[in-house]
Image (cartoon, rainbow, N blue to C red):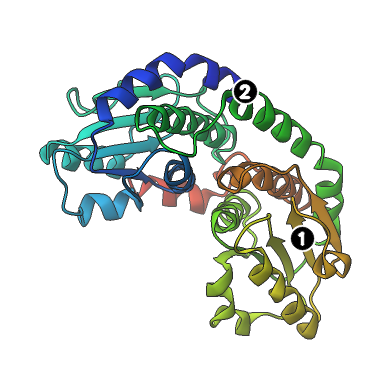
């Protein structure tokens, strides 16, 4: 619902912003945590559909403190659920000081927070989430950047352009279908709740799913979870694997799929179970897995959306199985409540 509403609502605004930033030499995507993962997805989508420019996603902390060499012809797009985070605001300041155009993608009721004059264009996504574990606001941010990619592709006469049917019909339908995996993810959460460590692995856009899922698991059930890019997993971290662990291999159709599925054989040698989440045709790795979670096929830059949904559902039900409240960021523990008061986000 959030996706469909935002795509319809921001169309005219995205057209105006695309016209204003079409001469950008480079476009930076900046965020923290889930917002950084939305920024990375935005980078992938703009690289595929937005025209011939330099695109780069960076964490807000790194962008603010180690600002790359910017030019007035650059555009900086900051993703922030509330628009108030320390390094998100600092990133906008650095961008403005360099004469860049600035765009803020944020939730309802938040965009007035940054200092006036720091933001040239504001896209508003969804109401502020009550849960500290952000989920649908990620989809809202990606919906905005997808429409902007479509409009930038048009003004840039990009050979590969996003069509309306993909954004307005195919993706909402794919998201709805992916939500139907809940029963399977509930079963898997119960079956694997007591595993020593949860590994989530994927390459390319699927690596974003791996990183975001691990973040959500830590936020909601406080379990040991590691999200890693495929090749990174192979070069060292796998030596920390034990048979008591559980793997999720995020393997959409695309360039990284075959390499990701090679890890299945490595897992089998150690004796750990594994689950494959994929939109591709069944392979030997799927047939040998403990479970194969199938999601609808979409262009690979958008696979972060469809493959993330079942992992969010797994995360939610894992927290419930463990008796944890997935929404409160462990604030029911006085130690963590005191800890949160010691640092400004």
| Above or below, 317 relative to 138 | below
Q: Is residue 229 left or right of residue 103?
A: right
| Above or below, 320 relative to 65 | above
Quadrant location of residue 283?
bottom right
Residue at position x 28%, y 31% from top?
Answer: 22
Residue wearing tag 1: 276
Q: Quadrant of the N terminus?
A: top right
- The one nearer the camera, 63 or 151, is 151
Residue at position x 56%, y 34% from top?
Answer: 139
- Label 1 close to label 2 by CB (< 8 Å): no
Where is residue 109? Give x, y as percent: 41, 19
Marked residue nearer the N-terminal end (1 or 2): 2
Q: Is residue 189 visible?
A: yes
Q: CA distance from mark 1 to mark 2?
A: 28 Å
Disc 1 is placed on an element classified as strand
Where is residue 312? Give x, y as percent: 67, 45
Give the crowd class for mark 1: few <14, some 14-19, many >=20 residues within 10 Å: many
Disc 2 is placed on an element classified as helix
Quadrant location of residue 79?
top left
Residue wearing tag 2: 168
Where is residue 304? Give x, y as percent: 60, 47
- The one nearer the camera, 286 or 21, is 21
- The one nearer the camera, 217 or 2, is 2
Residue at position x 38%, y 17% from top?
Answer: 13
Foreground label between 1 and 2: 2
| Above or below, 47 relative to 156 | below
The numbered mark at residue 339 is none
Q: Is residue 338 left or right of residue 248?
A: left
Residue at position x 66%, y 68% from top?
Answer: 260
Give the crowd class for mark 2: few <14, some 14-19, many >=20 residues within 10 Å: some
Q: Quadrant of the C terminus?
A: top left
């Amino acid at each position: 619902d959030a996706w469909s509403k935002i795509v319809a609502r921001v169309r005219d605004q995205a057209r105006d912003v695309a016209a204003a930033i079409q001469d950008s030499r480079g476009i930076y995507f900046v965020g923290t945590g889930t917002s950084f993962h939305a920024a990375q997805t935005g980078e992938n989508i703009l690289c595929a559909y937005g025209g011939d420019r330099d695109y780069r996603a960076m964490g807000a902390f790194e962008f603010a403190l180690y600002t790359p060499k910017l030019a007035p012809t650059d555009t900086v797009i900051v993703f922030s659920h509330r628009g108030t985070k320390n390094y998100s605001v600092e990133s906008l300041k650095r961008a403005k000081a360099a004469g860049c155009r600035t765009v803020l993608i944020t939730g309802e009721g938040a965009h007035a927070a940054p200092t006036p004059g720091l933001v040239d264009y504001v896209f508003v996504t969804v109401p502020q989430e009550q849960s500290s574990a952000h989920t649908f606001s990620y989809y809202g941010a990606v919906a905005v950047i997808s429409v902007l990619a479509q409009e930038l592709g048009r003004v840039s006469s990009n050979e590969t352009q996003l069509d309306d049917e993909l954004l307005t019909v195919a993706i909402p339908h794919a998201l709805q279908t992916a939500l139907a995996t809940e029963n399977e993810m509930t079963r898997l959460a119960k079956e694997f709740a007591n595993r020593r460590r949860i590994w989530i692995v994927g390459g390319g856009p699927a690596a974003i799913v791996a990183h975001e899922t691990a973040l959500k698991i830590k936020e909601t059930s406080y379990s040991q979870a590691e999200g890693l890019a495929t090749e990174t997993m192979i070069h060292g971290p796998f030596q920390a694997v034990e048979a008591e662990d559980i793997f999720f291999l995020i393997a959409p159709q695309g360039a990284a799929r075959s390499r990701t599925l090679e890890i299945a054989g490595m897992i089998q040698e150690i004796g750990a179970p594994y689950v494959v989440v994929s939109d591709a045709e069944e392979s030997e790795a799927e047939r040998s897995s403990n479970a194969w979670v199938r999601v609808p096929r979409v262009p690979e830059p958008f696979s972060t959306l469809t493959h993330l949904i079942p992992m969010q559902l797994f995360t939610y039900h894992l927290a419930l199985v463990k008796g944890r409240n997935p929404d409160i960021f462990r604030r029911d523990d006085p130690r963590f409540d005191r800890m949160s008061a010691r640092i400004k986000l």
